[in-house]
Amino acid sequence: HPLALRSGAARPWRGQGRATGHLFRFQVPMAPEKWLLKDDAQAVADLFGGWAGSRWRSTSDFSDSVEEFRHAMLVPGVAHSALEYYRWAFRAQFRGEGRRFTDAVGGRITAPTLQLHGADDTCILPETATSSVRWAGPHAEPELWPGVGHFPHLEAPDRTSAALVDFLK
């Protein structure tokens, strides 16, 4: 696939490894929760700013959304719960539960699949999305949207809704 050749086809996962460096930071107990909550959850704003597309970042909707997510992160227990996903996804790979999960979902999906992906996503790189097609079912070629980052449903909600309705038809 042409996008797989972008930024070094020989090692497409090297860039993705750098892009998901936060995954390793989140493995440490308690420190990441403190980091997320510090300065009224400023880290949430920083993550959104780094992962969102430039078009959305320059809108009032971005500012309003980030404030809502920061506010939500400050609810007791939310920071811990948000990080548990990353902890389980990483640590389970090395435990029996992770192997069972991988066995259960390790095959190719047979149902039609809609994959919307921001071409400007710096968290899950477009090359990673494109290379995941081998696991997906019919119609699984990702729609890469220029100017959109990690949050297509927030950055382009009308376009996302239209794509979903068209797919479901």
Image (tube, rainbow, N blue to C red):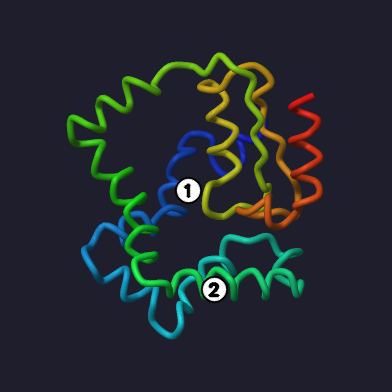
Few, some or many C-alpha atoms within 10 Å of disc 2 (few <14, some 14-19, many ≥20)? some
Q: Residue furthest bottom?
A: 39
Q: Amino acid at mark 2?
A: Ala
Q: Disc count in the image?
A: 2
Q: Secondary structure at mark 2?
A: helix
Q: Nearer the viewer, residue 133 or 114?
A: 114
List the residue tagged with mark 2.
45
Q: Secondary structure at mark 1?
A: helix
Residue 67 versus residue 22 in the image, above or below? below
Residue sitting at 46 percent across and 83 percent down? Answer: 40
List the residue tagged with mark 1.
15
Residue sitting at 67 percent across and 48 percent down? Answer: 118
Please state if 40 lies on the left or on the right of 85 as rendered: right
Q: Residue furthest top?
A: 110
The N terminus lies in quadrant: top right
Residue sitting at 59 percent across and 76 percent down? Answer: 67
Instruction: Give x and y (percent) for residue 84.
Output: 32, 54
Instruction: Give x and y (percent) for residue 111.
Output: 59, 17
